[in-house]
Image (tube, helix red, strand yellow):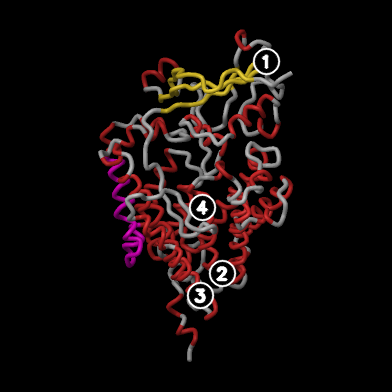
């Protein structure tokens, strides 16, 4: 019996570029996520963080998580070792070293990355409670089974990635239709560019577009998220054309917002539906990145990919039911491994933007103080400052400040204020500007302002990007006992 012929169906010989993009793209985002953890995790969640992991690991729930900290006691040094190792291994995949070996080598590398990041994100509490954390984990697991350059790209795994993109896009579309009325009456984008968690340099330009353009923008989003995902499973070149529409909408989101790596990883994953012929027709230079790979698939590797496909199919039942449920969950995991998750974003749109401005003073008495603001790198603060581009990097503290203005606080903010009063260096490094240059302030307070983008006329007259008005006090002047 010719085993090579028997397993020929398992390989998709015309998806070499797709595998190239998927493996290296997901690994690049994982590398960024690990580097982000090195830079931010200790101050936010470390031994002396705002929500310390050692305290979290004392909970009964934490003892059921599949994380290394159950056996390897958490320290900030060990976190840096784990994240640093993940960054190095991710970089190796980006340059293509594991892909040159046998098919099992990339499998092992990606599974190690998956387990390492699972151990980091699962103890990240509110600072890691974002849908793109689970999305990265699921992507690392599925892409692990794309194999090396010695085997054909497995069709089962490519379909699994398309199913992931389908849940991501269709889930986001359905949560919008079931959620905020503004999505149904096509007015959501009258507000979204201005009120999104972290605007970027183009957000104001997008917000000031005519309202009919915003309505078309919203309608186009519905078409791409609710209709186009079904075509990702169609024969070529229809699937590639559907992927192109998803890619275009994701690029628009990249241009107009700072959504960490959500849009960037969606761009990468969507390539699972793009075949080499379509790429050669549109982007010939990209086709030359890889040579035409083998069309054969070893029996053991075909069996492995089929087993993985069956596993993901079984695990997908809760998320599939969730897509058609009237009580659809957004960004939910149905198992501790973060596989076959439910996704979605912005089921409701805030129509006004409130910002918490944190200030300190060196004065002995707060009533006579000259208050100076702490400036965050990404979130709006100084009305004269144009929003910056940070995505795909994730500024976790800045994002949580947006939720804080909406009334969400898991107890981290009072610890954050305490760290400011102590002039804690790791905490201050999370900020763009400390007005006291490392000195301890005598008092810290937090005020709430209503922000909106300046109109073109206001921008010309005042030089401001934001117009703001004080709404009230979130935290009255607070100091350390002396």
Residue 292 in the image: x percent, y percent?
49, 70
Farthest front residue?
Answer: 60
Closer-to-camera residue (326/207): 326
N-term mark: 2 or 1:
2
Q: Overall secondary structure of the magenta stretch?
A: helix
Q: Secondary structure at mark 3?
A: loop
Q: Which residue is under mark 3? A: 294
N-term mark: 4 or 2:
4
* Alpha-carbon span between mark 4 and mark 2: 25 Å
In the displayed structure, 104 sits above or below 28; it is below
| Residue 148, label in figure | 2
Mark yes or no: residue 347 visible. yes
| Residue 362, label in figure | 1
N-term mark: 4 or 1:
4
In the displayed structure, 166 sits above or below 175; it is below
| Residue 134, label in figure | 4
Q: Residues within 10 Å of mark 4 (few under 14, many from 20)?
A: many
């Amino acid at each position: 019996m010719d085993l090579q012929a028997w397993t020929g169906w398992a390989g998709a010989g015309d998806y070499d570029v797709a595998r190239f993009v998927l493996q290296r793209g997901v690994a690049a985002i994982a590398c960024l996520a690990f580097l982000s953890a090195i830079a931010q995790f200790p101050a936010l969640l470390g031994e002396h963080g705002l929500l310390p992991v050692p305290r979290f690991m004392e909970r009964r729930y934490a003892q059921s998580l599949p994380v290394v900290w159950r056996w390897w006691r958490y320290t900030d040094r060990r976190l840096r070792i784990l994240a640093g190792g993940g960054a190095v291994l991710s970089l190796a995949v980006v340059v293509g070293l594991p892909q040159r070996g046998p098919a099992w080598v990339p499998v092992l590398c990606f599974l190690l990355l998956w387990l390492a990041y699972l151990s980091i994100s699962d103890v990240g509490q509110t600072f890691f409670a974002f849908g793109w954390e689970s999305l990265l984990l699921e992507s690392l697991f599925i892409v692990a089974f794309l194999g090396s350059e010695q085997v054909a790209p497995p069709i089962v795994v490519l379909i699994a990635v398309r199913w992931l993109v389908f849940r991501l896009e269709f889930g986001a579309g359905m949560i919008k239709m079931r959620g905020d009325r503004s999505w149904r009456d096509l007015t959501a984008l009258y507000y979204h560019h201005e009120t999104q968690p972290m605007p970027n340099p183009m957000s104001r330009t997008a917000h000031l577009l005519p309202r009919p353009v915003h309505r078309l923008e919203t309608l186009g989003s519905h078409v791409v998220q609710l209709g186009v995902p079904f075509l990702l499973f169609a024969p070529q070149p229809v699937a590639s054309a559907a992927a192109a529409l998803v890619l275009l909408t994701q690029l628009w989101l990249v241009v107009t917002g700072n959504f960490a790596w959500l849009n960037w990883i969606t761009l990468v994953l969507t390539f699972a539906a793009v075949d080499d012929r379509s790429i050669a027709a549109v982007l010939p230079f990209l086709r030359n990145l890889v040579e035409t790979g083998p069309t054969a698939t070893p029996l053991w590797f075909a069996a492995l990919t089929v087993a993985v496909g069956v596993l993901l199919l079984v695990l997908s039942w809760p998320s599939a039911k969730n897509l058609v449920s009237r009580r659809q969950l957004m960004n939910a995991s149905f198992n501790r491994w973060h596989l076959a998750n439910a996704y979605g974003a912005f089921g409701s749109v805030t129509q006004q933007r409130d910002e918490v401005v944190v200030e300190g003073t060196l004065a002995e008495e707060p009533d006579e103080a000259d208050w100076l603001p702490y400036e965050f790198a990404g979130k709006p603060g100084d009305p004269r400052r144009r929003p910056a581009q940070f995505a795909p990097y994730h500024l976790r503290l800045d994002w949580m400040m947006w939720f804080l203005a909406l009334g969400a606080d898991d107890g981290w903010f009072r610890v954050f204020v305490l760290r400011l009063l102590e002039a804690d260096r790791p905490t201050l490094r999370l900020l763009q500007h400390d007005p006291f240059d490392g000195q301890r302030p005598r008092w810290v307070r937090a005020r709430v302002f209503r922000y909106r983008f300046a109109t073109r006329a206001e921008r010309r007259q005042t030089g401001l990007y934001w117009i703001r008005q004080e709404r009230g006090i979130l935290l009255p002047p607070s100091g350390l006992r002396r």
